[in-house]
Amino acid sequence: MNKDNIIALTVLVILIVFFPLLSPSPYNLSIAIFAGINALLAIGLSILMGYAGQISLGQAGFYGIGAYVSAILSLKAGIPVLLSILFAASVAGISAVLLAVPALRLRGHYLAVATLGFGEIIYIILNEFGPGGPSGFGDIPRLSILGYFFDSSTNFFYLTWTVVTLAMIFSINLIDSRIGRALRAMHDSEIACKAMGLDIVSLKIKVFVLSAIFASLAGSLYAHYVTFVSPSSFSLFHSVLIVMMAVLGGINNLWGAILGAIIITILPELLRKFEEFDVLVYGLILTFSLLFFRKGLVPIFIDKLKKLRA
Amino acid sequence: MLTVFLQFLFSGLTVGAVYALVGMGFNIIYNATSIINLAQGEFVVIGGLMMWFFTSSVKLPFVLSVLLTILTAGLIAFLMERLTIRPIQKTDLLLMIMITISVSIVLRGLLMFKFGKDPYGYPPFTEGEPISIFGAIIQQQALWVIGVTAVSIVLLYIFFNKTLIGKAMKACAVDPVAARLVGINVSQMVMLSFILSGVVGAIGGIAITPISLMEYDKGPMLAVKGFCAAILGGLGRGRGAIVGGFTIGVLESMTAGYLHSGLKDAVALIILLLVLFYKPAGIFGSSAIARLRKF
Amino acid sequence: MLNVNGITKIFGGLVALKDVSFSVQEGYISALIGPNGAGKTTLMNIISGILTPDKGKIFFEDQEISNLQSVRIAKMGISRTFQHLEVFSNLSVLENVMVARYTKTKSGFISSGLKLPFAKKEELTAKKKCEEILDYIGLYNRKNEIASNLPIGEQRTLEIARALATEPKLLLLDEPAAGLNIKETKMLGETIKRIRQEKGITILLVDHDMELVMKISDWITVLNFGEVIADGKPSDVQKDPVVIKAYLGEEL
């Protein structure tokens, strides 16, 4: 791990430790938790899109699988929450394989729309066959690890952001490893990768599975924090938002994913005062940032910093 | 038996007509730019809601309302192209997808601001008794929808094959560099393609709203269905989208009728995935050509 | 070592290769030459598995490879460079070479992400090995440069370094001298000879630069319009009237 990443991680950890100590309102604390959940989604997508060059507009599908499977297992089957979460992650992983095997032969628009179709199908399944249908269900048990219950916002905040930090460390390591190099190389020249003996198909499938597992974990965290789920949280719109987070922060920068997630999570809250304008203002901000910060916020910031140093 | 089947068939064809129009809208832009305009569905909504505004709220005469609605949709498409598509010179696929999506959010925001969240409708184009065929009831408006679609298809066909501008647009689709060399203004053609597909979508909205009502957030689903139609017929193939649209409409209506209404929306998506996985060039497309496509 | 047997390749009606046969002896530097459009690169692509032949068979160390995927062929010990450069442009020079160690290393997603001790060790060994290769080929001082920032000549060298890192038995060089100046070409010739001599790697080379080809090759196969018109030692090929007429004639 290079120096910049270590510094950034240290800053992140300090922020995480001190944020609840500033005694934020329960409302702000819950926003921070949602930001963490979204960050997890965006990190997974950033590896998939930014580094491996694959597009997914269906992340909300895996997010939904994570939420519903672990919620149903723990609530209806009485399986311990932690075990349910792991099981949900494997369901998401297997679905990712099933989707990836045929889909990853596709490129560009075709891949984008195939993943979008997958996400929508999951959404329809949740609507039609999920407990409670479109209105969802509640009373989902809270997470406990070794008898310790995550039942307050504060400890759930620490839990969520610890998961985000660990996911971040894992991802940073991965990007700078045999696998990460192969993924990035694939992005540059598939033909050369093949000539070097890289098994591109299996790499693509595995990175897809990884992003699905991240999304599933995020979904499980969501379900066991809110203790209520309904399909509307896992619609196409959320898939779009996840892409937006990664793109806004800088698609091939993992830190961009975290920043993008925080901004996209806070934005609607800030726009509350616009009332019926909120969707409009939201759309305008997204459009403007896409047009004017095309490279993403973090890469732009790094460029500026480099110029200052020079 | 037959009556029920025919009933489902007709309602499927009616909805399918709109999907076909949206699908054609996708193709028009895709051919000119290799962009998938995911805001395509919003233009159908604009068509329905603006038509309501002009006829039922301002109480303008029917024909004038239609013209004004089409004008509005064309203008919005024009602005969209000028403000968001043109500034991006490099065709970064992901950026383009996200831009069209964020424009669709802006349009939804505008529509919600103006019209709120309620569904709107207005009277059918012609009053009169529904027609009965073997016991199946067909509303007159359904015939209007199919008729309007048919006329649009014919007009588009004439435009692309008989007029100079249409031929120039086709040339841009085949080879933009060569088109530029022979003096065609490619960027104008791109703009035109946006206007045209916006108008086509709006026409679909004007026709279908008396039957199905229209609300501000119907766009994304319409876009997905229209896209399925375009993919099914082979992306970029005008006639393909027509067959694709009607096929999806009918299958949807059959599923809703015979199986389960909640699965209606899944049908189009499952077809979409099957086509993408097994015949990405569409049922009429050649895979060799699909492979040559940039995206 | 490599036997190409009656290969035919047709691109929609156009015959690119017609019943092409030749072989590459172990330990040789062999060259494939011919005028533009003779089918040399097509042949390279078929040998390395990027294209499949319409007819004919290819044997590598007595195993048939004609219909294998390029990944399998690469794993069997055939590595290549590209006429149109295919360096991983956003990776550093060192990373480019390290990608080529992929098949020789094992750590997967989990061990890489968790940085398990064995993955760490493997990474260090790979890094050392690749630095040695870069040193050997003369790119060590550029190792942290982003590949796309290198001049063409160094990018070509980088492709060779990358191919070497897969520890091939047979190295295919597709026009390695294209875009190089006289001095760079001369150095390239030395490098190729050194690779054969010191590493014992057999080389099959496609190039336009006759001086380079004549100087370093042990064996030359001449293609014209997709057919083999001559096959022999450089001195013999040089004298062959058919070759002179088809190809060298213009230059001599």
Image: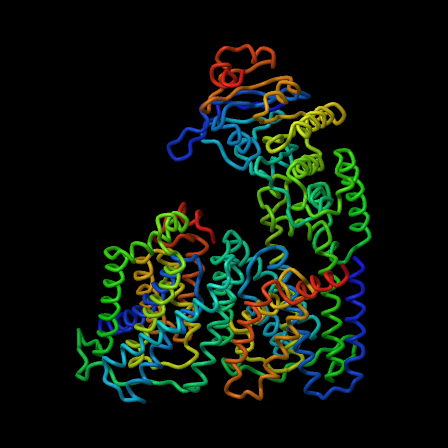
From the top left corner, tell me how far across and down residue B6 is, in percent: 24, 71
Q: Nearer the viewer, residue C115 or B52?
A: B52
Q: Look at the picture and state if C130 lies above or below B197.
A: above
Left/right placement of residue A135 relative to residue A192 reads: left
Left/right placement of residue B165 relative to residue B188 reads: left
| Residue at the (30%, 84%) spot, across then down | B54
Split into 4 quadrants, where in the image is the N terminus of chain B?
bottom left
Q: Quadrant of residue B56?
A: bottom left
Q: Is residue B189 visible?
A: yes
| Residue at the (29%, 57%) spot, across then down | B166
Q: Nearer the viewer, residue C66 or C145?
A: C145
From the top left corner, tell me how far across and down residue A138 is, in percent: 60, 84
Q: Nearer the viewer, residue B83 or C108?
A: B83
Q: Quadrant of residue A91?
A: bottom right
From the top left corner, tell me how far across and down residue B119 is, in percent: 38, 85
From the top left corner, tell me how far across and down residue A249 is, in percent: 64, 67
Q: Quadrant of residue A241?
A: bottom right
Q: Nearer the viewer, residue C232 or B29?
A: B29
Q: Look at the picture and state if A161 lies above or below C88.
A: below
